[in-house]
Image (cartoon, rainbow, N blue to C red):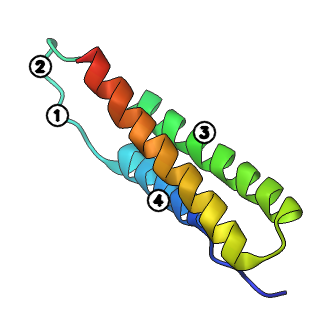
């Protein structure tokens, strides 16, 4: 079986690394003013990795040409990134 690297595979790997780093990272205790939400962030990044992996498998089933797959998945990643920045700017 030939392994094909795609943009959603890269996103999935990055999200898994972020989740592991958030779980390993030790926070300072003693300041009751701040609430530690690293567990929630790790859960969200793990969930994002699962969604990226599943959507990558769906795209692979329907798009057989690897160049078209890269274009479609790359456009999806770019669209989601732009959408995140727009939402973040409108909230702030």
Q: Which residue is mark 4?
A: 14
Q: Are marks 4 and 2 in contact (CB under 8 Å)?
A: no
Q: CA distance from mark 2 to mark 1?
A: 8 Å
Lower position in the chain sequence, tag 2 or tag 3 = 2
Q: Is residue 66 above or below residue 57?
A: below
Q: Earlier in the sequence, mark 3 or mark 1?
A: 1
Q: Residue furthest bottom?
A: 2
Is label 2 in contact with label 1 (beta carbons under 8 Å)? yes
Q: Does residue 38 appear to the left or right of 26 in the view shown?
A: right
- Mark 4 vs mark 2, CA separation in Å: 30 Å
> Callout 4: helix, strand or loop?
helix
Q: Earlier in the sequence, mark 1 or mark 4?
A: 4
Asked if marks 2 and 3 touch (Cβ < 8 Å), the reply is no
Quadrant of residue 27 in the image?
A: top left
Q: CA separation, marks 1 and 4?
A: 25 Å
Comparing marks 2 and 3, which lies closer to the viewer?
3
User: Residue 20: percent from the left, percent from the top?
Assistant: 45, 52
Q: Quadrant of residue 73?
A: bottom right
Instruction: Pick whichever, 12 or 23, lies toward us.
Output: 12
Residue 8 visible here:
no
- Rendered image: mark on residue 31: 2
Identify which residue is drawn at 30% across, 19% down: 90
Residue lying at the far top in this picture: please name it. 33
Instruction: Name the residue: 82% across, 65% down.
Output: 63
Using the rendered image of the protein, determine whether residue 20 is visible from the camera's viewpoint. yes
Q: Nearer the viewer, mark 1 or mark 4?
A: 4
CA–CA distance in space, label 2 to label 3: 29 Å
Label 2: how many Cα within 10 Å (few below 14, some 14–19, many 20+)? few
Residue tagged 3? 47
Looking at the image, residue 60 sits to the left or right of residue 24; the answer is right
């Amino acid at each position: 079986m030939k392994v094909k690297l795609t943009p959603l595979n890269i996103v999935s790997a990055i999200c898994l690394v972020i989740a592991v780093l958030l779980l390993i990272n030790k926070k300072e205790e003693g300041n009751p003013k701040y609430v530690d939400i690293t567990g929630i962030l790790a859960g969200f990044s793990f969930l994002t990795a699962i969604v990226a992996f599943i959507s990558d498998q769906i795209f692979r089933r329907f798009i057989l040409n690897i160049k078209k797959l890269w274009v479609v998945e790359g456009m999806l990643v770019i669209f989601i990134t732009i959408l995140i920045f727009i939402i973040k700017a409108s909230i702030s």
